[in-house]
Amino acid sequence: GAVVSQHPSRVICKSGTSVKIECRSLDFQATTMFWYRQFPKQSLMLMATSNEGSKATYEQGVEKDKFLINHASLTLSTLTVTSAHPEDSSFYICSARYGGDYGYTFGSGTRLTVV
Amino acid sequence: GQNIDQPTEMTATEGAIVQINCTYQTSGFNGLFWYQQHAGEAPTFLSYNVLDGLEEKGRFSSFLSRSKGYSYLLLKELQMKDSASYLCAVLDSNYQLIWGAGTKLIIKP
């Protein structure tokens, strides 16, 4: 149980274009979704926290106009990287809390490469 | 500030035992997680400790000392598939996960 499906797993896009990453909770309602970025050989860096039906809370240094987060339903949260640049190339992972202290589950991640 | 320290890399031999340490300084404490992450994949849950002591789960055990701000993950009977990064994360007073940089574990035959 408590599965988060993340798509796409890999995407290559041209500089200046936008990319949308989706995370769906398959068997539970995710009221809160966390979006992380991970550069090679580094730990997870929290970008933003999204709550269903409200605006996302962004971490310091993360541009909200560049990384658009939409959490329109209890089962779907999306991250759109707008006007992507090569430095945005990274591994993006979503995570949802599904209940209790144990309940953090991760999507499978999206490897974004901007060329 | 909030800080979690763990070794960058460790090497161990197949069949042996390895202990990965994690020390933390956070604003509040609501539990400590250990996750395993293979290269190019998302982290997978290993353990959660909120009370002092040792939690054993098969070949993996996790220990916590809240007074010392210290935890370790113990892996027994190491297998080649255990080669991965092991991430320590603390749930702070705001129930936000604070992540360590991870320990890359290399298993040699």
Image (tube, rainbow, N blue to C red):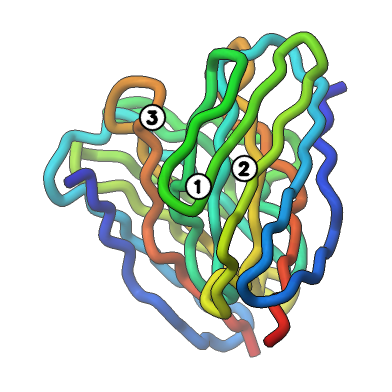
Name the residue carrying label 3.
A102
Q: Which amino acid lies under the numbered mark 2 shown in the image of this protein?
A: Leu
Verify CB contact (< 8 Å) between mark 2 and mark 1.
Answer: yes
- Both marks 2 and 1 on one chain: yes
Residue A44 place in picture, x, y as percent: 65, 51
Identify the disc placed on residue A46: 2
Asked which secondary structure carries label 1, the reply is strand
Task: Decide which of tag 2 and tag 1 comes sooner along the chain.
Answer: 1
Asked which secondary structure carries label 2, the reply is strand
Circle 2 or circle 3, nearest the eye: 3
Decide: few, some or many residues near mark 2? Use Cα within 10 Å; few <14, some 14-19, many ≥20: many
Q: CA distance from mark 2 to mark 1?
A: 6 Å
- Chain letter for mark 1: A
Q: Residue shown at 64%/47% (left/top)?
A: B74
Q: Residue shown at 32%/20% (left/top)?
A: A100
Task: Decide which of tag 3 and tag 1 comes sooner along the chain.
Answer: 1
Q: CA distance from mark 2 to mark 3?
A: 19 Å
Asked if residue A68 lies left or right of residue B20, the reply is left
Verify CB contact (< 8 Å) between mark 2 and mark 3.
Answer: no
Q: CA distance from mark 3 to mark 1?
A: 18 Å
The quarter of the picture where residue A47 lies is top right
Residue B34 place in picture, x, y as percent: 57, 42
Q: Is residue B16 above or below residue A85?
A: above
The quarter of the picture where residue B107 lies is bottom right
Circle 3 or circle 1, nearest the eye: 3
Decide: few, some or many residues near mark 3? Use Cα within 10 Å; few <14, some 14-19, many ≥20: some
Identify the disc placed on residue A35: 1
